[in-house]
């Protein structure tokens, strides 16, 4: 059995924020973990959200719960874990506090949004961290000689069987630096040609029976509403200052790039490993991040990389 390693897993915990601010959490969404491993605690029917526990049923009716989402894990569902959608104006902090009082509930949390960590692009910040008389610190990728990556490359330059899941803003998998480094899901690669985005493989069928249709290279868990997720984990660029969109591509390039195999121009950089495979998983909220981590475990990827901030409370789920 493979062991999944979480590297660069940096989550900074802040005191609970006011979730009326959509920058902090998704409006009206609460993640609930029930005790035990019972299935179908919550269901959705023509009568709305239904719960096997009468007290919780009454509470959900009073609060106007209108839909639920479950957590796929392979061909099964994760028992007892649900995302409940209330009206977007609902006080999710109050709901979390109140629903946690039920004996059947282990924890409840808002669907917190991610804030990605960035460094300034100032010249001094990038070049003068270490001894000023060290000529290597003037290189654009000074960190590689600083950690003596070249000596490590004399021993190994990575392995194409090693998979690195990048849980971030998405990866620009068409970038020439990733020519040979994007993972292709063998269970969805119908013609077995290993082509990264092969139209022949996108047949609208969940060929590997893991709950995700045509997840050929990964998955986009970004959207606030899980039914809008799709199989295209590419960054969505915007015009915002300091846009986080490129962050995932940058993290992926640090992990694995086919060195010495692209044209010597401004797109050519060196990665820590040369041959490992990158799995793009685009995430933007606590629910999406949890789903992505289950995806990593179900697929038995070797490494999961995360670098983000959550503003979290004191409930067990977010801790």
Image: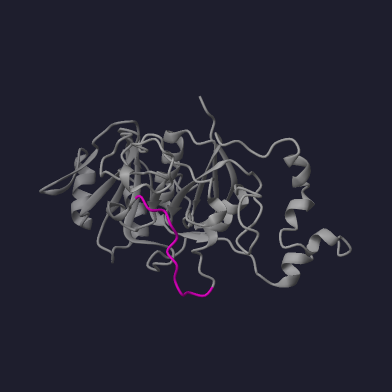
Q: Magenta region: which residues? A: 231-241
Res 190 → quadrant: top left
On screen, residue 76 versus residue 15, left or right, reads: left
- Residue 239: within the magenta? yes
Q: Residue at x 62, y 57 (%)?
A: 263
Res 6 → quadrant: top right
Q: Position of residue 272 (x, y in %)?
A: 66, 47
Q: Position of residue 185 (x, y in %)?
A: 41, 38
- Report the front residue among 293 and 37: 293
Taking 317 as reference, is 38 above or below it?
above
- Report the front residue among 288 and 271: 271
Q: Position of residue 196 (x, y in %)?
A: 43, 46
Q: Position of residue 268 (x, y in %)?
A: 63, 58
Q: Residue at x 45, y 60 (%)?
A: 235
- Magenta stretch mostly in which secondary structure? loop
Q: Residue at x 51, y 48 (%)?
A: 166
């Amino acid at each position: 059995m493979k062991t999944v390693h979480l590297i660069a897993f940096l989550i900074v915990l802040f005191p609970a924020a006011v979730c009326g601010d959509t920058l902090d959490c998704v409006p009206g969404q609460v993640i609930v973990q029930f005790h035990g491993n019972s299935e179908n605690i919550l269901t959705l029917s023509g009568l709305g959200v239904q719960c096997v526990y009468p007290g919780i049923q009454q509470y959900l009716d009073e609060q106007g719960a209108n839909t639920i989402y479950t957590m796929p894990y392979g061909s099964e569902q994760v028992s007892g874990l649900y995302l409940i959608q209330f009206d977007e104006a609902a006080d999710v902090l109050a709901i979390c506090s109140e629903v946690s009082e039920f004996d059947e509930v282990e924890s409840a949390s808002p669907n917190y949004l991610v804030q990605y960590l960035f460094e300034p692009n100032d010249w001094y910040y990038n070049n003068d961290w270490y001894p000023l008389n060290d000529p290597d610190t003037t290189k654009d990728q000074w960190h590689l000689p600083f950690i003596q990556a070249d000596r490590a490359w004399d021993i190994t330059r990575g392995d194409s069987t090693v998979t690195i899941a990048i849980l971030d803003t998405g990866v620009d998998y068409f970038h020439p630096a990733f020519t040979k480094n994007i993972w292709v899901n063998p269970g969805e690669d119908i013609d077995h040609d290993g082509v990264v985005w092969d139209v022949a493989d996108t047949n609208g069928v969940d060929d590997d029976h893991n709950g995700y249709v045509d997840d050929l290279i990964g998955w986009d868990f970004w959207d606030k509403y899980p039914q809008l997720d799709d199989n295209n984990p590419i960054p969505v660029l915007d015009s915002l200052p300091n846009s986080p969109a490129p962050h995932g591509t940058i993290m992926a390039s640090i992990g694995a790039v086919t060195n010495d195999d692209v044209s010597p121009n401004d797109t050519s950089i060196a990665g820590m490993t040369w041959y490992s495979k990158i799995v793009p998983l685009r995430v933007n909220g606590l629910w999406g991040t949890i789903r992505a981590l289950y995806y990593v475990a179900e697929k038995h990827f070797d490494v999961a990389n995360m670098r983000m901030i959550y503003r979290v409370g004191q409930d067990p789920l977010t801790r």
